Amino acid sequence: MSGHQVALALALLMGLSVWGVFAGIRMYRADAKLPSDLVLALEVGSTRTGAVDSLVDRLGMRYAPAVLRLMGPTLVARYRRRIDLAGNPGGLTINRYAARRAVYGALGGFGALVFFLRGQYLMALLLLAFGAFWTEVGIWAAIRVRRDVIERTLPDFLDVLAVVVGAGLGFRQALDRVSTRYEGPWADEIRITLRQMDLGMSRRQAFAELRRRNDSEQVAMFVTALQQGEELGAPIVDTLVAIAKDMRRTDAQNARRKAARAVPRATLVITTFMVPATMLLLGAGLLLGSGTDFGSITGK
């Protein structure tokens, strides 16, 4: 790559950087019309996110509607559900997600272009991957963490709920009482369900929405058993205790399956890396301790 091309790329980089600073200041001060979803996220959700994400949201908020139009209704609906499954981490909404896609996509694409012109193709590929998948990585990680926390909390929650219902409190009041004693995503989900019931939604529909918002087998088991017990007229306390026992049995089976899958992986790592490294160390120690004259062997 010639020096003229490098100078041209650096000049382009500096010019776009200056333009980005002024454009960011202009967007920050401009009275732009934003979707109500994004306005709520910026005003309320800003307290739940870091300074970097808040800055990225403000820089990309103007381009969020354009990104959503490019994504199309089907893809927007798919990502809206994924954001719901993640529990809206850091106040994330579909419009806020689009704003971050715009900023990270622009940064990744521009950085990839600069490194491509400099002949560093691996860095260009990594920056392209960063622009395309960085936001998705955060959502994917939040979904996994949230599901694991819910599945750990649910059996104990059901045991406490069964005790409170058995003490004579109604199911609706017991849910409200127990959810106030817990913190985390499952308590938030229960409070959302109770709020929907307060607004006129039937209990069956509210719990169906609870199952839809959570990609968890245990939540689906809880809602299904609860609805079946309600249809068959089974005592709610017995139903809750049975669900908690089934969940703990399922957790134990999953733990045994994970342990069984971990044994071949550990064996592969040991035979591939640890055994050869140990043999090399032993061989080198024996050779050095034998007092062999390496000069006579090499002729030096």
Image (spheres, rainbow, N blue to C red):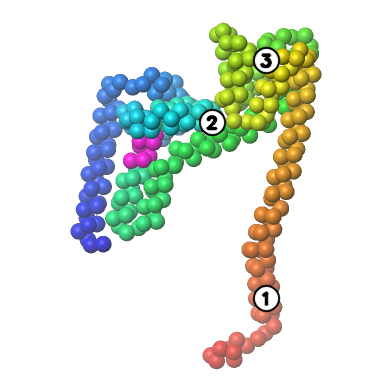
Tag 1 or tag 2, which sits nearer the N-term? 2
In this rendering, the answer to whether 172 lies above or below 122 is above
Kindly indicate whether the residue at mark 1 contacts the one at mark 2 (C-beta within 8 angstroms). no
Residue 86, numbered circle: 2
| Amino acid type, mark 2 | Ala
Task: Characterize the local packing of mark 3: few (<14), some (14-19) or many (20 or more) Cα atoms within 10 angstroms.
Answer: many
Residue 236 image point, x, y percent: 76, 15
Residue 195 image point, x, y percent: 57, 13
Q: Which residue is mark 1?
A: 283
Helix, strand or loop status at disc 3: helix
Residue 175, numbered circle: 3
Taking the spot 22% from the left edge, 57% from the top edge, the residue there is 5
Image-quadrant location for residue 202: top right
Closer to the eye: label 1 or 3? 3
Image-quadrant location for residue 205: top right
Residue 132 image point, x, y percent: 41, 42
- What is the CA distance from the residue labelled 2 to the residue labelled 1? 52 Å
Kindly indicate whether the residue at mark 3 contacts the one at mark 1 (C-beta within 8 angstroms). no
| Amino acid type, mark 3 | Leu
Q: Is residue 224 visible?
A: yes
